[in-house]
Amino acid sequence: MDTFYQVFGFVAAICIGIIVLTAFFTAVGYFKSKTRGFDIVKIKGFVKDGRLVNVHLSSGQVHRGVRFVGFSDQSSTKGGVPFQLSQMVVCETQKGARVFFRPDAVRIIEEVEDVA
């Protein structure tokens, strides 16, 4: 009977350790997801850093002379933002203001030398 208690105690200690570690890492993941906002995803080789682009939209509107920053990524954050707004094209104006475009509204991203 003493051997049973020794084996059972060892197995119980391992199970309790696994449960505690699972609870800890779940709590850490929850707090990370609640405190994290949008991330900007940059794509290498897509548009050179600092280059000006003209963004042509489906509506016929053209935003000239903005800098392409990247794409917003909220895959790590759960809830809070509608799905349609979770993946946006991020550009920056000459004054430093950020402009977000819905990806389905963008028809062409044209890389230019300077604003005409």
Image (cartoon, rainbow, N blue to C red):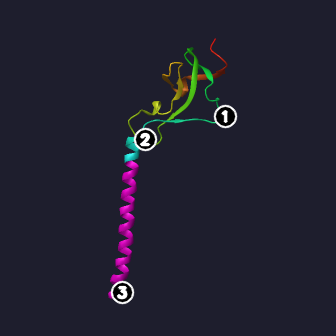
Task: Mark 1 vs mark 3: give the one in front.
Answer: 1
Instruction: Kindly state the secondary structure of the residue where label 2 is placed.
Output: loop
- State left or right for residue 48 relative to residue 40: right
Q: Which label's residue is closer to the chain start, 1 or 3?
A: 3
Look at the picture and state if 22 lies above or below 2: above
Estimate how packed mark 3 is, as few (under 14), some (14 to 19) or many (20 or more) residues with alpha carbons within 10 Å: few
Provide the residue designation for mark 1: 45
Residue type pointed to by label 2: Thr
- Main structural element of the magenta stretch: helix, strand or loop? helix
Residue plotted at (58% across, 35% down) = 42
The earlier-in-sequence mark between 2 and 1 is: 1
Residue range corresponding to the magenta coloring: 1-30
> Which one is nearer the viewer's eye here, 115 or 6?
115
On-image quarter of the C terminus: top right
Give the residue at mark 3.
3
The magenta stretch spans residue 32: no
Q: Quadrant of the N terminus?
A: bottom left
Which residue sits at x=64%, y=21%? 110
Per the model, the C-alpha gap separating discs 1 and 3 is 65 Å
Q: Measuring from the top left, give residue 101's x and y in whole percent.
A: 51, 24
**Residue with the mark numbered 2:** 77
Tag 3: residue type? Thr
